[in-house]
Image: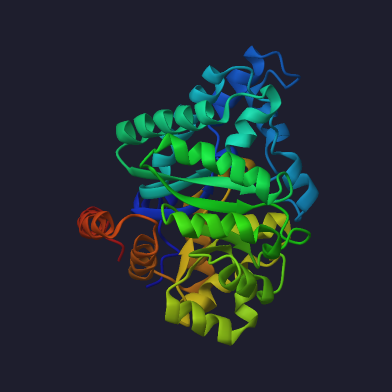
């Protein structure tokens, strides 16, 4: 089906499942601006100028260092700031037609500048996120992000124990992010061995974004990854693709983010379309939409235009995302049934021919 004639609001209304989005890159711009001004940060008073300063230039050439420079940790001066930005940011996620999301965040990001209590930050983020998602009408769960170039595995274990003590059922997984070039999976074996032994949380590992497919193999074989963040280099290894299919290990792919960071500089040839057509379990995600000055809907439109995908394809991609979610099986099955009803409602109210 040719969908080039469809306006963005139709794509936005399509019910989506997202598994790879960082809260730290998802902010409500207006809420963040208000917090920055209130806290006396040196930012432009004009909102449009603030956005230009805070976001990656949408149509500029890839620049990894510029992209990273947008992730500031000094926005917050109080726990109320953390609660406020979380609530407004999660509320705005509904604009992308989200049905279910596993939103990941790093307690360290929000706590670092003021040395806030990490447990309190985690609790606040989830309480505020739950309230916003309930009001906006979508399902939400959380992944806790650990940054490989900011903590060693034993520091991670200390934080993990604190998160575990909270016993928050909405936390369903652990995410390993950060510099995969210089901090390989082999540095975190004890940490992930503990996670596997506990059996409480599943894991997703950023791998193969800017590294060869061998790093994806390591994430799976060494750390026991249940999903792979990005995994673009899987396109270069057919045996890996077969393994991902056989063991149903989904790739969380992010077309716009990979372009802006330089991980894959031609969105039109991004591996997502080829991997999907080969039957590899792939999911479509936004990564850091506020930082990127974009949204998840933009990635759907890019995928439709570049790879000839239609809403039937996107329906299957989102079913795959739900099946590879970190929910307990009973909840997963119930949401799959509910998702089919959401699809039916979409197709009834948005004829696409």
Left or right? Give the position of 151 relative to 290: right
- In the image, residue 336 sits, relative to residue 240, either above or below, namely above
Q: Is residue 121 left or right of residue 187?
A: left
Give how far across and how far down residue 134 sits, in percent. 31, 34
Position of 215 with respect to 15 (left or right) is right
Q: Quadrant of residue 186?
A: bottom right
Q: Position of residue 275 (x, y in %)?
A: 52, 77
| Residue at horizontal 63 percent and vertical 64 percent from the top | 207
Q: Which quadrant of the figure contains the C terminus?
A: bottom left
Residue at x 63%, y 65% (from the top left corner):
267
Q: Nearer the viewer, residue 344 or 198?
A: 198
- Look at the image and tell me in which quarter the N terminus lies: bottom left
Decide if residue 345 is in sight here: yes
321 and 205: which is toward the camera: 205
Left or right: where 243 falls relative to 52: left
Residue pictured at 54% horizontal, 25% vertical: 82
- Residue 269 visible within the image: no
Q: Residue at x 58, y 86 (%)?
A: 238
Q: Position of residue 292 (x, y in %)?
A: 63, 46
Q: Position of residue 23 (x, y in %)?
A: 54, 40
Can you say whether 280 is above or below 48 in the image?
below
Give the total of numbered labels. 0
Q: Which residue occupies the extreme bottom position in the image?
A: 239
């Amino acid at each position: 089906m040719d969908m080039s004639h469809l306006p963005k609001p139709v794509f936005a209304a399509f019910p989506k499942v997202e598994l790879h989005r960082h809260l730290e890159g998802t902010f409500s711009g207006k809420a963040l601006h208000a917090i920055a001004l209130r806290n006396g940060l040196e930012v432009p008073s004009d909102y449009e100028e603030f956005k230009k300063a805070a976001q990656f230039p949408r149509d500029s050439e890839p620049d990894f260092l510029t992209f990273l420079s947008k992730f500031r940790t000094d926005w917050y001066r109080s726990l109320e700031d953390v609660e406020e930005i979380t609530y407004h940011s999660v509320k705005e996620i509904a604009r992308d037609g989200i049905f279910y999301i596993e939103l990941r965040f790093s307690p360290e990001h929000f706590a670092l500048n003021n040395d806030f209590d990490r447990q309190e930050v985690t609790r606040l983020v989830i309480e505020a996120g739950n309230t916003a998602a309930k009001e906006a009408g979508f399902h939400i769960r959380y992944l806790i992000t650990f940054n490989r170039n900011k903590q060693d595995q034993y520091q991670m274990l200390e934080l993990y124990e604190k998160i575990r003590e909270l016993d928050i059922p909405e936390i369903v997984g652990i995410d390993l992010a950060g510099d995969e070039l210089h901090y390989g999976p082999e540095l975190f074996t004890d940490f992930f061995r503990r996670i596997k032994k506990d059996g409480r949380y599943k894991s997703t590992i950023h791998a193969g974004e800017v590294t060869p497919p061998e790093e994806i193999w390591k994430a799976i074989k060494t750390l026991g990854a249940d999903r792979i963040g990005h995994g673009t280099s899987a396109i270069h290894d057919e045996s890996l693709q077969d393994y991902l299919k056989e063991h149903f290990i989904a790739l969380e792919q992010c077309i716009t983010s990979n372009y802006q960071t330089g991980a894959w500089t031609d969105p039109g040839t991004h591996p997502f379309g080829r991997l999907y057509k080969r039957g590899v379990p792939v999911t479509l995600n936004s990564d850091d939409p506020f930082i990127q000055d974009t949204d998840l809907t933009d990635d759907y439109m890019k995928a439709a235009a570049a790879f000839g995908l239609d809403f039937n394809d996107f329906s299957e991609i989102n079913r795959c995302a739900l099946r590879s979610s970190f929910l307990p099986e009973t909840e997963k099955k119930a949401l799959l049934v509910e998702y089919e009803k959401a699809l039916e409602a979409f197709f009834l109210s948005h004829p696409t021919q």
